[in-house]
C-alpha cells in the first residue's frame, strides 16, 4: 500500500471521531439540508462597491497578512442601497508581486449579513483584475467562463458569481477603479455541500482518488488547456473526503494559466514537453483509463451548452475577438476528441503513470 493511501486512510478513521480535517465532519443530514448561498443562485452580474483602506491593504505583502475592516454595498430589488460589513486581506504569491490590484480574500459574518445577498458565504475566494486595464479585465471574464463550464459538467465544482466592482478608498474617499471580478465558493462550504470535508494532506495518488470524478476533472483540464495544477501536491486543486470514507473527490480551481485564458504572464512548467499554454497536454492518471471514455463523452454531450455560454448575457461581456478565440480553441478540442478512438490516439498517450 502506498504511503499516501496509509495517510489518507488514517485520516478518514480519525476524522470519524474528531474534527482534525477542516472543522467537524458533516453528517449526511448536514449535506442533505445544505442550502446554496443566495449569491450563487443566479448568474447575472451584480454591481457592488467595496470600500476599504486600499493603500493600507496593498502594503500587506507577507504570508500572514491581517484582515482589514471593509464594506460591500449593493442595490436591492427595491432600489435601496444595502451596506454589508466584511473583512478583506491579501493572499497568494505571484499576483501579490506583479499586480497593481492585490488578490483579496473576503470574510463575511453570518451575524451581520442576515437577509442580504452575501449571507452564508463564509470566506469565498475573490478573483479581481490584476491591473486597471481592459486587457486584464478580459482575462478575469475569460477565467470566470471556465468556472461556468466546470459547473455545466459537474456539481463537484465551485459555484461562482460575477461582480461589477467599484473600489472605493475609505481613507481618501476616492474611487480607484470599476472593474469586473468574481467570487467563488468557500472551499469548506463546497466540501460540506458534497457531504464531506477538505483533506489538507499532500501525496494523494490514483488509488486515493475517485476514478470517475478524477477522469472528468482531467478531461475538463484538457478541454481548457490547463497543466498548472496538482492534486497530489494540492496546487490549484482540493480534495474532499466524504463522510462514508469513499475515495476523495478532486476539485480544480484557478485557471488563469490555462490555454483558454492565454494570459500574457502565463508560463509552462519547463519539465513538461510543451512550450506554450496554448498547447494541450493531458495530465490525467493512466490508472483511470476505464473512466475516460465516459468522461470525454460527458464533455462532448455539453458542447452546445459550453459554446452557448459565449453568447449569453455574461458571454457578451467578452470582446468579439476574445470570444471567437475561445470558441476556436474549444472547437479544436471537440475535433480531436470526437470519438473514443481519437481520444486514445490524440490525448491519452501522455497520461501519467502511477509512481
Image (cartoon, grey):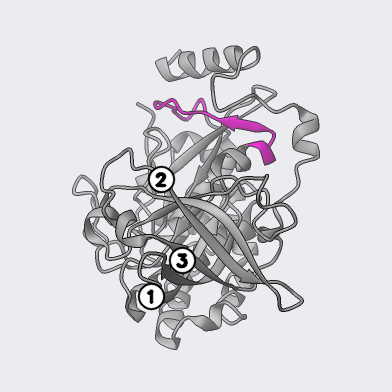
Extreme-bottom residue of the structure: 320
Rounded to the nearest angstrom, the CA distance separating label 2 from label 3 is 22 Å
Q: Is mark 1 on a helix, strand or loop?
A: loop
* Circle on res. 299: none
Residue 187 appears at what percent x and percent y? Answer: 55, 42
Relative to residue 72, is residue 117 drawn left or right? right
* Circle on res. 333: 3
* Residue at the spot 61% in from the left edge and 45% down from the top edge: 109
* Residue at the spot 42% in from the left edge and 45% down from the top edge: 67
* Circle on res. 174: 1
Rounded to the nearest angstrom, the CA distance separating label 1 from label 2 is 35 Å
Note whether 197 is above or below 160 in the view shown: above
Note whether 261 is above or below 21 in the view shown: below
**Between 2 and 81, the one nearer to me in the picture:** 81
Q: Give the range drawn in magenta.
A: 192-208
Relative to residue 98, is residue 91 drawn left or right? right
User: Principal SS element in the magenta part?
Assistant: loop
**Between 70 and 264, the one nearer to me in the picture:** 70
The answer to if 194 sits in the magenta stretch is: yes
Dot 3: within a 10 Å radius of its alpha carbon, few (fewer than 14), some, or many (20 or more) residues?
A: many
Dot 1: within a 10 Å radius of its alpha carbon, few (fewer than 14), some, or many (20 or more) residues?
A: few
Note whether 132 is above or below 22 in the view shown: below
The tag earlier along the polypeptide, 2 or 3, is: 2
Q: Name the residue under label 2.
A: 236
**Between 345 and 217, the one nearer to me in the picture:** 217
Residue 142 appears at what percent x and percent y? Answer: 45, 70
For the residues carrying marks 1 and 2, which lies nearer the camera in this image? 1
Amino acid at each position: 500500500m502506498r504511503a499516501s493511501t496509509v495517510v489518507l486512510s488514517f485520516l478518514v478513521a480519525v476524522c470519524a471521531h474528531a474534527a482534525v480535517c477542516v472543522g467537524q465532519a458533516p453528517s449526511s443530514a448536514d449535506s442533505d439540508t445544505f442550502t446554496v448561498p443566495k449569491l450563487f443562485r443566479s448568474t447575472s452580474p451584480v454591481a457592488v462597491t467595496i470600500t476599504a483602506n486600499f493603500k493600507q491593504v496593498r502594503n500587506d505583502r507577507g504570508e500572514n497578512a491581517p484582515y482589514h475592516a471593509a464594506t460591500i454595498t449593493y442595490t436591492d430589488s427595491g432600489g435601496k442601497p444595502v451596506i454589508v460589513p466584511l473583512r478583506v486581506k491579501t493572499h497568494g504569491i505571484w499576483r501579490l508581486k506583479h499586480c497593481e490590484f492585490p488578490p483579496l480574500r473576503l470574510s463575511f459574518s453570518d451575524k451581520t449579513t442576515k437577509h442580504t445577498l452575501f449571507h452564508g458565504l463564509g470566506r469565498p475566494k475573490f478573483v479581481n483584475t490584476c491591473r486597471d486595464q481592459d486587457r486584464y479585465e478580459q482575462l478575469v471574464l475569460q477565467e470566470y467562463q471556465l468556472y461556468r463550464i466546470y459547473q455545466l459538467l459537474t456539481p463537484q465544482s465551485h459555484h461562482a458569481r460575477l461582480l461589477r466592482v467599484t473600489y472605493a478608498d475609505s481613507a481618501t474617499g476616492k474611487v480607484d477603479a470599476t472593474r469586473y471580478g468574481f467570487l467563488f465558493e468557500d472551499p469548506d462550504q463546497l466540501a460540506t455541500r458534497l457531504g464531506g470535508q477538505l483533506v489538507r494532506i499532500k501525496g494523494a495518488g490514483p488509488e486515493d482518488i475517485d476514478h470517475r470524478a478524477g477522469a472528468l476533472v482531467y478531461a475538463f483540464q484538457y478541454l481548457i488547456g490547463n497543466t498548472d495544477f496538482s492534486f497530489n501536491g494540492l496546487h490549484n486543486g482540493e480534495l474532499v473526503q466524504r463522510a462514508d470514507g469513499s475515495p476523495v473527490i478532486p476539485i480544480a480551481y484557478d485557471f488563469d494559466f490555462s490555454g483558454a485564458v492565454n494570459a500574457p504572464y502565463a508560463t509552462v512548467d519547463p519539465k513538461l514537453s510543451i512550450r506554450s499554454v496554448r498547447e494541450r497536454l493531458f495530465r490525467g492518471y493512466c490508472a483511470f483509463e476505464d473512466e475516460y471514455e465516459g468522461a470525454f463523452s460527458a464533455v462532448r454531450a455539453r458542447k452546445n451548452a459550453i459554446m452557448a455560454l459565449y453568447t449569453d448575457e455574461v458571454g457578451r461581456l467578452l470582446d468579439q475577438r476574445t470570444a471567437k478565440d475561445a470558441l476556436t480553441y474549444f472547437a479544436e478540442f471537440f475535433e480531436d476528441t470526437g470519438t473514443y478512438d481519437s481520444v486514445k490516439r490524440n490525448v491519452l498517450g501522455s497520461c501519467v503513470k502511477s509512481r
